[in-house]
Image: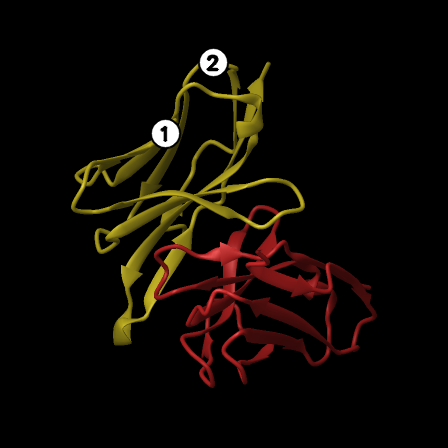
Chain colours: A red, B yellow
């Protein structure tokens, strides 16, 4: 009963490095989302996807790219990491719209 | 501009008592509201929701009340248990352009239930 799985759980990057965060869901959900959580800022939507092959920008998309080549996977890329991208990243999925989303356990990213 | 406000960053209650977590919103177009619970080092988990056509929804020890005229909702936990200690997020949803729903999150309230 995996649900939503994020890899990796922790990562430290140097400024300017790139990386990809992987999100996988096994619930056949159409919608997938990437959020970041920062102290005092709540959860902010970075990008989302309403189905395989589609992506859309959320509230804070700058500095990130995403891809949804397969329905079960949603990848978040940082091309050139900056200290401002130090955060906890959560992936989520839902059957349709935002009625009830299931979250992964989070990825703690530190950019030094 | 915070459209969904949880004005109490933290709340402390005694085990067995009622916990009341509050949430205010500014956009009258929100038509669906959700509460999520989050433990440290875990992702949020869905707790309970309510549609704007209702004013109350119950699920076991958890009840959500919606007052549309006041743009206010609250989550009641009765009786509170130590395992309820977590951060509770209120979220509000509306139908965005193109029928993609938009979800706006509050900043969360940290609930501590003391044995």
Q: Position of residue A55 (x, y in %)?
A: 47, 80
> Left or right: A68 with respect to B24?
right
Mark 1 neighbour density, 10 Å: few (under 14) some (14–19) many (20 or more):
few
Q: CA distance from mark 1 to mark 2?
A: 14 Å
Do the numbered discs 1 and 2 sit on residues whose CB atoms are within 8 Å? Answer: no
> Left or right: B54 with respect to A107?
left
Q: Quick one: label 1 or label 2, which is nearer the N terminus? A: 2
Q: Position of residue B26 (x, y in %)?
A: 29, 48
For label 1, the SS is loop
> Left or right: B95 with respect to A16?
left
Task: Answer above or below: position of B65 versus B93.
Answer: above
Find residue B52 and name its label: none
Task: Answer above or below: position of B50 versus A38.
Answer: above
The picture quadrant where one finds residue A15 is bottom right
Residue bearing the label numbered 2: B16
Task: Answer above or below: position of A31 versus A65.
Answer: above
Q: Going 48% across and 69% down the picture, which residue do you hit?
A: A32
Mark 2 neighbour density, 10 Å: few (under 14) some (14–19) many (20 or more):
some
For the N terminus of chain A, give its image quadrant.
Answer: bottom right
For the C terminus of chain A, give its image quadrant.
Answer: bottom right
> Left or right: B50 with respect to A28?
left
For label 2, the SS is loop
Q: Going 53% across and 82% down the picture, which residue do you hit?
A: A70
Task: Answer above or below: position of B2 versus A18.
Answer: above
Q: Nearer the viewer, mark 1 or mark 2?
A: 1
Find residue B60 and name its label: 1
């Amino acid at each position: 009963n995996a649900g939503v799985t994020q890899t990796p759980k922790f990562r430290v990057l140097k400024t300017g490095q790139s990386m990809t965060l992987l999100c996988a869901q096994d619930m056949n959900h159409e919608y997938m989302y990437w959020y970041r959580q920062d102290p005092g800022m709540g959860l902010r939507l970075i990008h989302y996807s309403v189905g395989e092959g589609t992506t859309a920008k959320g509230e804070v998309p700058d500095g990130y790219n995403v891809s949804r080549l397969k329905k079960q996977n949603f990848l978040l890329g940082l091309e050139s990491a900056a200290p401002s991208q130090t955060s906890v990243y959560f992936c989520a999925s839902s059957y349709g719209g935002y009625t009830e989303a299931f979250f992964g356990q989070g990825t703690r990213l530190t950019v030094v | 501009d915070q459209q969904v406000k949880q004005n109490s960053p933290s709340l402390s209650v005694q085990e067995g008592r009622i916990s009341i977590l509050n949430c205010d919103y500014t956009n009258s177009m929100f038509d669906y509201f959700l509460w999520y619970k989050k433990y440290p080092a875990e992702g949020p988990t869905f707790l309970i929701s309510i549609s704007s056509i209702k004013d109350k929804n119950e699920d076991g020890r958890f009840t959500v009340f919606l007052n549309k005229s006041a743009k206010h909702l609250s989550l009641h936990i009765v009786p509170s248990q130590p395992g309820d200690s977590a951060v509770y997020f209120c979220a509000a949803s509306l139908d965005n352009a193109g029928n993609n729903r938009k979800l706006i999150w509050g900043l969360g309230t940290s609930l501590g239930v003391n044995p």
